[in-house]
Every structure is written in C-alpha cells, then in structure tokens.
Image (tube, grey):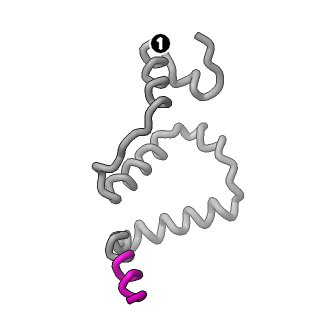
Amino acid sequence: MYISGTLASAVRDEGDFQRVLRMSDSIIDFSHLTPAERIELAEQLWNSLEPRDHGEIDLPDEQLAELRQRRAELDADGDSGEPWEAVLDEIESRGR
C-alpha cells in the first residue's frame, strides 16, 4: 500500500486505509445535527489540527488579524447571532 502526503500520516495500518477508502466513497450525512452542532463540529475539527498543520494554511497577515479580531469579539459578546431559520423567515417576509 503506497500513500503519500498528509493522508499517509493519518493511515497507520490496513484497517485505517480501508476506513479512509470508505469515507471517500460516501458522503457523510450531517443532517441530523443542528446548525449549532455543525459549527461546533467544524470548530473541533479545526482545533484538532496540530499547530504545525496551521502553517500549511497560507493566509495573509491581514486576514489572520481579522479572523482573530472577529473571534475575540464573539468571545467577548457571547451572542452567536440569530438562527438561520429566523433570518430566512425575515428575508422571505420582506418580499410579501
């Protein structure tokens, strides 16, 4: 079995290799999760990256600063906004 790159570091044995193949053959269904749970999952997935992995993501310093500022504002405010369903309802009601 020959695997290169990032995938190679995640695949330790034949069982891992088969799991990766199954993952790539199907779409993972997240429809049972609420939007908030999906966001939490994305954050956990992002946070699971090793610090050395973050270096592989080439963002300009200005964008990194903006992201850090937005995260700090969210952490300070604690309000994650309105549920998307409420926003969509409001937008649709404007057209009536």
Q: Position of residue 96 (x, y in %)?
A: 38, 89
Task: Identify residue type, mark 1.
Answer: Asp
The tally of labels here is 1
Residue 52 in the figure: left or right of residue 45: right
Q: Is residue 30 left or right of residue 25?
A: left
The residue positioned 59% from the left and 38% from the top of the image is 53
Q: Is residue 7 visible?
A: yes
Q: State the residue position of label 1.
A: 13
Please state which of residues 7 and 57 is positioned toward the viewer in this rendering: 7
**In the rendered image, the vertical position of residue 25 relative to residue 76, given as above or below:** above
Label 1 secondary element: loop
> Where's the N terminus, which quadrant?
top right
Crowding near the residue tagged with mark 1, few <14, some 14–19, many ≥20 C-alpha atoms within 10 Å = few
Residue name at image x 34 percent, y 78 percent: 89
Magenta range: 88-96
- Residue 71 vertical position relative to residue 50 in the rendered view, above or below: below
Helix, strand or loop for the magenta stretch, by majority: helix
Please check the rendered image and state whether residue 95 is part of the magenta-colored stretch, yes or no.
yes
